[in-house]
Amino acid sequence: MTYRKIAAATALLTAALLGAAVPSGAQAAAPAPSCSSSATVKETLPNGTTWQLCWRIHDKAGLILEKVFVSTKRNPQPVQVLDSIRLAQLHVPYDTGDMEFDDLTDLGMGGSYLETLAGEDCKGGSARLGSDGSGEPKQREVLCVSAEPSGLAYRGREETWDDNGEKSVLSSDQGHDLVLRTISKLSWYEYVTEYRLHDDGQISARLGATGDLAPDTEADAARGWPIGKDANYYSTMHYHNAFWRVDFNIAGKGGERVDQYDTTLDGRGEVTAKLKTARTTIAKEGTFSKVNQRWWRVTSQSSRNTDGHLRSYELVTGGDDRYEGHPETKPDVTFSQKNPCEKYASGNASDPECPPDRRTVLDFVKDKEKMTDPVMWVRVGFHHVPRDEDQSPMPMHWQGFDLVPRDFTAMNQLTPDERTGQNGNPQPEPSGARD
């Protein structure tokens, strides 16, 4: 059976998931995309959440999402979240100190490095035709769009009282993600650029790596791991320092504010320690790193939810290995004023119309310009210490971060009908609760 036939057959599940009905208002209210129909993704997940966006392939950055909107069954009017999101660099230095690469600017995730989907690449999804970013008019199946179960989305058992006495009402549901992914083959490694748009409004950016270990034999026991029989060959340890460029445009208004929150000890209470959480507004460009109980959000200064709270998205990072070999790979996040000359986090491409001194994210923020339209640069590192199981092909390993809605809507975007009356109205403590 050909790949096209396999894709057509297995896409039925995704079609069923994405074809779930939503209120007609959600569809009618969706803003007209600023891209062609072939470059538009507009899909509805089973619980009524609709994501709409434009996509394209750049010869260096690979998959770019633009004009990203979300609406839900309970909030049917589409609201913009992002102006764009894309990879901004993949820096790969080897522990031996004799090799390093800036994969995006040296090679690129598009063009001849972008793979045409085949085999199991898009099983259960829909393979979309598009340009590979090289400027060639030929269209290839390069983007996989699928709806994938994400597990239990929420569960709550509520005790209520009626004329017959106490009863229990269970609310629970399974979640789904809209997933967009491309595959690029750069020498031995094959990289999966993936964005997961969750039905609760969360956005997850991920980079997956598979393929094969590079055949480098220069490592010793301090810089490599024995692969194969005994200790005759050491596969070199190395880093994958991935950067993303995130440009918010909440509700299409822009002009967001960057907030940093820190929680610290604040004396003792009657039972245990007291804590206080304080907000610091980051008004000027800069680089920032995580410490215990620190996080950031990008906050609209004009768009509010129905409770009157300013909409925002919070940056949530997971596992990360900080690479100490270069100054620009040390900060976890950099906030800069939007500038069309600032395209890549390192190895920034030269442009005759741009100043020649803007090479890395550190150059972008050295003048501490006041931010009226901030761009967020997120770095996530992975120190790859090879193992026997990495051969062959190498199992997929992932790195990335989440953008989590904070006060974007007044309640959980998946709130069931029976729980809508609880906004700002917590229920009495259930029986059997801890003392």
Image (spheres, grey):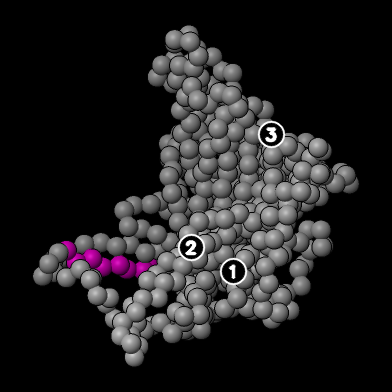
Residue sitting at 40 percent across and 63 percent down?
Answer: 260
Question: Label 2 amino acid?
Answer: Ala
Q: Amino acid at mark 1?
A: Asn
Residue 340 in sight here: no
The picture quadrant where one finds residue 216 is: top right
Indicate which disc residue 198 carries: none
The answer to whether the residues at label 1 and label 2 have Cβ atoms under 8 Å apart is yes
- Residue 47 - label: 1
Residue at the extreme right: 137
Residue at horizontal 75 percent and vertical 38 percent from the top: 118
Segment colored magenta: 273-280
Looking at the image, is mark 1 or mark 3 earlier in the sequence?
1
Residue matched to label 3: 185
The local crowd at label 2, few if under 14, some if 14 to 19, many if 20 or more residues have their Cα within 10 Å, is some
Main SS type for the magenta part?
strand
Q: Residue 289 placed where, x, y %?
A: 40, 51
- Mark 3 packing: few (<14 Cα in 10 Å), some, or many (20+)? some
Looking at the image, residue 70 lies above or below residue 58: below
